[in-house]
Image: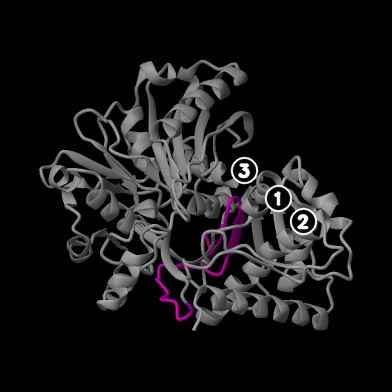
Amino acid sequence: MTYVLAIDQGTTSTRAILFDGQMQPVASAQEEFAQHYPASGWVEHEPDDLWQTMLRTARTAIARAGLRPAEIAALGITNQRETTLVWDRATGRPIHRAIVWQDRRTADLCEALKGRGFEDMVSARTGLLLDPYFSGTKLAWLLDHVEGARARARAGELLFGTVDTWLIWNLTGGAVHATDATNAARTLLYDIHEGRWSEPICEMLGIPMAMLPTVRDSAGDFGVARRDILGAEIPILGVAGDQQAATIGQACFLPGMLKSTYGTGCFALLNTGATPVRSRNRLLTTIAYQLDGRPCYALEGSIFIAGAAVQWLRDGLGVLDSAAQSQPLAERADAQQEVVLVPAFTGLGAPYWQPQCRGAVFGLTRNTGPAELARAALESVGLQTRDLLEAMHADWSPAGDDSVLRVDGGLSANDWAMQFLSDILATRVDRPKIRETTALGAAWLAGMKADLYPDMQGFAERWALDRAFEPEMKAQERSRRYAGWKQAVQATLAMANPS
């Protein structure tokens, strides 16, 4: 048994990647699934879509590799975080669609809880903010709005889980109801200092603690995928939320190391080691990974819209046929036009945390066209990342201005966007040879637990650079462009909160 199967269940698609004994990808499959928008700012998934796309991609990847399932030593799972599911303990049937991490329906509840003075208590225990982003208020909404749900939850009939828990439950035929520390840390319900579910927060939200899964290490025993599901009994030995898995896949194991993943959103994590650093700039304190019962902490900044801005150009405006067209289009943009896109389609994330904001475009002229919009969309990713890194540097000095940023995710393949990122940050940007770092992180956790892959140091030594982007923009131009961005953000905030 010399292969590891990694499941990467993302926001818009599910991927399965088989890695060999040298941690090299040998076969993969990917499938998109439907997004549901029942109201403004609401985003949902069909739970069965998450499960069925996982099944199909896993089986397809195994077939493409020409393997017998019995040759797979372990299975690792990485997943979109915060997305919230509730299902019947006896039947496994969900009581509602999954409420996606992007969903903003609990904004009013969060404001009400802030008004009652709860945010300091929540932040001190969880490292998070009272924001609709996280699972806790989504779970409370389901219990309040699905008929009979709260009574059934109190009676022990319902289970809660993030996507990893849902997949584990189905893979094991309902034998295991568990999550790992990184996913638990994103629920708003988990005390990251005590390493357990927080009774005061569950009481605040009216959530019966019997609904909550068991929390395990990121490399741990999560049961066995049944033979009738994947063709062999395969132990599930690694689980991590997608951004933490990417941090692991980028080998950011030392305090001060920094990575940013560019998928649907953008998520930057700064390793702070054994010490949780509480942000003074509305970043998140979270668990980067937990091994042998010891958590490693990180500061995180979350941007809700990164690659999704390119998807909007393709699907919403129809100015692109494919995301790959964004680079040549941006390269043709009129340099004299400085169009600024603030992509607050589902609110602004860190360091603003304004869920009521909506997107805005500034600097339009009669000559503005698809090329200028494409450039503005790609630039918005770099400009938002600078917001995050400025806050991180202010919170924790070891990061320093000379930090190297390791990047991954689909948008990291866009050379134009990565060069602008380096320019606006005045920082070297390193892109690895294996860009599927999220899946690689999940695979390493499982393979390491199965004694197939090397330890942390051995894994870090194998990290390989594809390309380094060095800043070329002049300092004066960089300052001017960032100042223009800050003005656009303030105008967008003002529109969302008129006096």
The reply, left or right, for residue 260 in relation to residue 144 is right
Q: What residue type is labelled 3?
A: Glu
Above or below 399: residue 333: above
In front of the other: 269 or 208: 208
Mark sitting earlier along the chain (2/3): 2
The reply, left or right, for residue 339 in relation to residue 39 is right
Q: Residue 166, percent across and down?
A: 35, 37
Cβ atoms under marks 2 and 1 closer than 8 Å: yes
Q: Name the residue under label 3.
A: 436
Residue in view at x 12 percent, y 47 percent: 154
Q: Would residue 253 be counted in the magenta stretch?
A: yes
Q: Residue 82, percent across and down?
A: 40, 52
Q: Residue 207, percent across and down?
A: 20, 55
Distance of label 3 from label 1 (alpha carbons): 24 Å
Residue in view at x 70 percent, y 49 percent: 317
Residue in view at x 19 percent, y 44 percent: 149
Tell me the SS state at disc 3: loop
Tell me the SS state at disc 2: helix
Q: Name the residue under label 1.
A: 313
